[in-house]
Image (cartoon, rainbow, N blue to C red):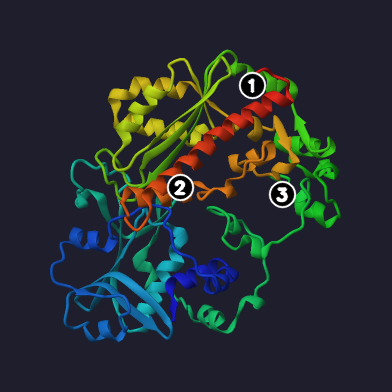
Amino acid sequence: MLHISDVKKYKRCPRLYYLSVDHPSVYQPYLRHDEELTKLVVEFLGLKDYYLGERGDDPSRVLEALDKHEWFVKARFAYEDLRIKIPVLHRVADGFDLYFAMYAPLPKAEDVEFYRDNIWVLKKVGIKLQNIYVIHLSGDYVRQEDLDLDKLFVIDRYLYKVKKPSIMLDDLKDQDYDLKTTLDQMRSHNLKDHQPVKRRACKARGLCDFFDQCFIEDLVDDDIEYLVSSSKKNEMKDRGIKHLKDADLDLIEGTRVQYAQIMASKNGGLYYDEIALKKWLEKFKDKTLCFIDFEWETYMIPPYRGLRPYDHVCFEYSLHMLKKDGSLTHREFIQTGDCREDFIRSLIKDIPKDACLVAYNAEGAEILRLKELKDQFPSYAVMLDDMIARFVDMAYPFSEGLVYHTKMRANFSVKSLVKVVSDLDYRDLDISNGMDAVYKWRLLDKNIQDENLDDVRSELSRYCSLDSYSLYLLYRWLCNITRHIF
């Protein structure tokens, strides 16, 4: 039996679908949603008496019940071997109104095929559709004490492109659309019929789980494949150019990072702009340095007062403090529940008022989280603004081409950089990335008794501590290569 999610995977990449069948993974949602969407929608619509589908239902069950109910929730339908689950159907005069439901501020036009596929199955089993709606979250909703579903949800009739109405859902039911060719291919083809093709989707929203199975390449550290922001590197590869140092200068865009990569290849692995790097390091002179990293959860439905859909709650930070006398100390915060105000207070207590705060990608992470906290807790605005003003972004010398080592292999994450400058490796930890940390913290937050929660807390501490310590190691490495006194 095929499910609509299988069709979505196949359309994105046939190999992704076939590999996922052979290597199923445990689903771990990136975004947290403790509340079941359909239950919230039922309450929002005020439904009392309705047909409720169940997992494992035979699709014939709902067909037999079509004349017995007005409302249908989580109804399973199937055409041939494709199975779908419809959030809400409403029997009206001469047909049914269809309600899709989604945990998103706006339904996107790029997902139109998902809606078409569901509509196609319904039409095939004889469901005559009248009006088609999508129930989605309101991006303007701010939670007060209780969850207000009338303000949280919006009933819409459009799919959006660049936040503007683009496709009316009602129009989809009248379109000449056939999914049968795709289904036939899914049944008759297999993995061997689809050779790997590297596309943007392979790295979209994070690396595909099967990327290494598709693109196992024997690359050297300064392979031309690692030339960043290059539209011509494949052309150079086809001409037999293998190393960055041999790049055709007429075929590069000429960014500072590309220049740093090429020079590192020519210099035996390392390039740095000594004057620019020393000037950047001067901002740390005679200051206490706080190398800091935050971890946070992202909620689809705001669980606490002052939060919007998709807002964040910081649950952990690690801080390595390098004092003027050269001593290094460590402080941390880990808490569950609505710990936002405690998080702020702990930061204020742990960070000296004259210290320089150092984070990686600070503008897109730590600074952004502090701005959100400032809006939610305005009484701390002055102190949080002061912290924000003292941040320095450790990513700057790497992202701007002030320094490059070929061992980086065009990967500018902290986890990759620290392996270049030290023997540390995140793979030695039980938690190896930010999402692993979030999944582990959920066990702690939900007080899952099947887990050793003391061990979970220790794993979270070790992981976040390594993040902030890695920033210290990067700083020390930059000082060492420029012979700057730290």
Q: Amino acid at mark 3?
A: Ser
Q: Residue furthest top?
A: 286
Question: Disc 2 designates what residue?
Answer: 437
| Quadrant in the rendering for residue 121 | bottom left
- Residue at position x 64%, y 35% from top? 399
Percent of width and height locating residue 384? 38, 24
Q: Give the label, 1 or 2, closer to the camera.
A: 2
SS for dot 2: helix
Q: Is residue 84 visible?
A: yes
Please tell me whether residue 94 is drawn above or below residue 362 in the rendered image: below
Q: Are marks 2 and 3 in contact (CB under 8 Å)?
A: no
Q: Which sits earlier in the primary sequence, circle 2 or circle 3?
A: 3
Crowding at mark 3 (Cα within 10 Å: few <14, some 14-19, many 20+):
few
Give the Cα separation between the discs numbered 1 and 2: 32 Å
Percent of width and height locating residue 29? 41, 57
Q: Which mark is residue 231?
A: 3
Q: Amino acid at mark 2?
A: Ala
| Quadrant in the rendering for residue 62 | bottom left
| Quadrant in the rendering for residue 124 | bottom left
SS for dot 3: loop
Q: Which quadrant is home to the N terminus?
A: bottom left
Crowding at mark 2 (Cα within 10 Å: few <14, some 14-19, many 20+):
many
Question: Disc 1 designates what residue?
Answer: 280
Q: Which sits earlier in the primary sequence, circle 3 or circle 1?
A: 3
Give the Cα separation between the discs numbered 3 and 1: 30 Å
SS for dot 1: helix
Give the Cα separation between the discs numbered 2 and 3: 35 Å
Q: Are marks 3 and 1 in contact (CB under 8 Å)?
A: no
Percent of width and height locating residue 397? 65, 30
- Residue at position x 58%, y 48% from top? 428
- Residue 372 as seen in the image, left or right of residue 221: left
